[in-house]
Image (tube, rainbow, N blue to C red):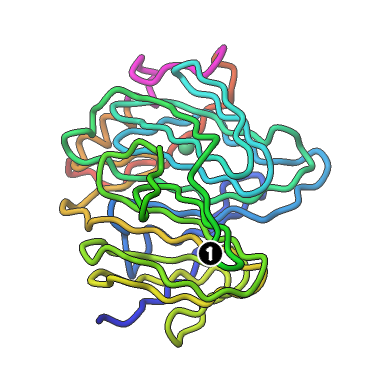
Amino acid sequence: MSPIVRIEARIVDLGEGMLVRRFLPSRQQRMVGAWCFLDHAGPVDFAPGHGMHVGAHPHIGLQTFTWLIEGKVLHRDSLGNEQIIRPGQVNLMTAGRGIVHTEDSLADGQRLHAAQLWIALPPEEQDCAPDFAHYPDLPQWRAGGARLTLLAGTYGEHTAPTRLYSPLFGLDMSCDAATAIDLQLDPEFEYGLLPLEGEVVIGEEGFRADEFAYLGRGHDSLGLRLAFGSRVLLLGGRPFDQPVLMWWNFVGFTKAAIADAQGQWESGDHRFGPVGDGSARRLVPPPLPWHDY
Ligand code: MN
């Protein structure tokens, strides 16, 4: 069995002092299955008059997967959806050929804690019709002092309702008492584990909050010891067999596809429609990093 790869966070400023810890993509590991992006936001207590406010920005070629732990966030998109997401819920936006959205704290001066993930769409779904889905109820069960919530895929008799396009797994474990837990894994999948709060011991190795553990593939079980008050996110998926390009908010398989999307966003092309009345601040991408597409 390959050793566990320990991946430290990169601190990324999303603007206006909103700092997040980014784990995927990382130098050591770009993806876990089709999970291609993982930010851990908060927990943060915003000062009065402050909150998370992400202006209008486009996506292509991916699904955005928001797992909210604390706070309330308003999602609005160019399909006309307006949805408040609350703790214990998932927002899943399928960008496909193109969508635009904004994300705002519902009220300023409040607490926020979330995991923001992206999922690369497989080649045959890259240009699918955009879609947005809100999942207020996910399968939950208890194991000792842990409450388990299935975010993606199947575990035993439980199947998450989240609509995905490749074989994936996502499980949140939240502990109100120290707990040892044995999970069944799929040896065809690769796995990664992020303690969001507290500590977890995998086998004999301890991982603190915000130390991502890449486990690789070939495991049919996983023994964890979870500390009191810990919260852990376990991700898995069948290794994605095609190299994915990621630039700004775009995922694609060619530089040309990404360059087209960026040009169309910058020129106001109708591929990327307005959010609401179109008055939301528009985010501006940095210049493309390549000139040879
Ligand atoms: Mn986004």
The image shows residue 74 at horizontal and vertical percentages of 62, 30
What residue sits 20% from the left and 62% below the top?
Answer: 188
Q: Is residue 31 left or right of residue 170?
A: left
What secondary structure prevails in the magenta region?
A: loop
Residue at the extreme bottom of the image, as rendered: 204
Asked if residue 282 shows in the view, the reply is: yes
Amino acid type at image mark 1? Ala
Report if residue 40 lies within the magenta region: no
Q: Position of residue 195 (x, y in %)?
A: 53, 67
On whether residue 267 falls in the magenta region, the answer is: yes
**Image quadrant occupied by the N terminus:** bottom left
Q: State the residue at coordinates (26%, 80%).
A: 2
Q: Foreground: 234 or 71?
A: 234
How many numbered dots are placed on residues in this image?
A: 1
Residue numbers of the magenta segment: 264-277
Identify the residue position indicated by label 1 in the image: 143
Relative image position of residue 285 (x, y in whole percent) = 43, 38
Image: 142 above or below 252: below
Which one is nearer the viewer's eye here, 141 or 165?
A: 141
Q: Is residue 290 above or below residue 275?
A: below
Residue 132 shown left or right of residue 241 in the figure: right
**Residue at left offset 25%, top offset 44%:** 166
Report the front residue among 141 and 130.
Answer: 141
Q: Indicate the quadrant containing the C terminus: top left, top right, bottom left or bottom right.
A: top left
Residue at position x 66%, y 44% in the image:
16
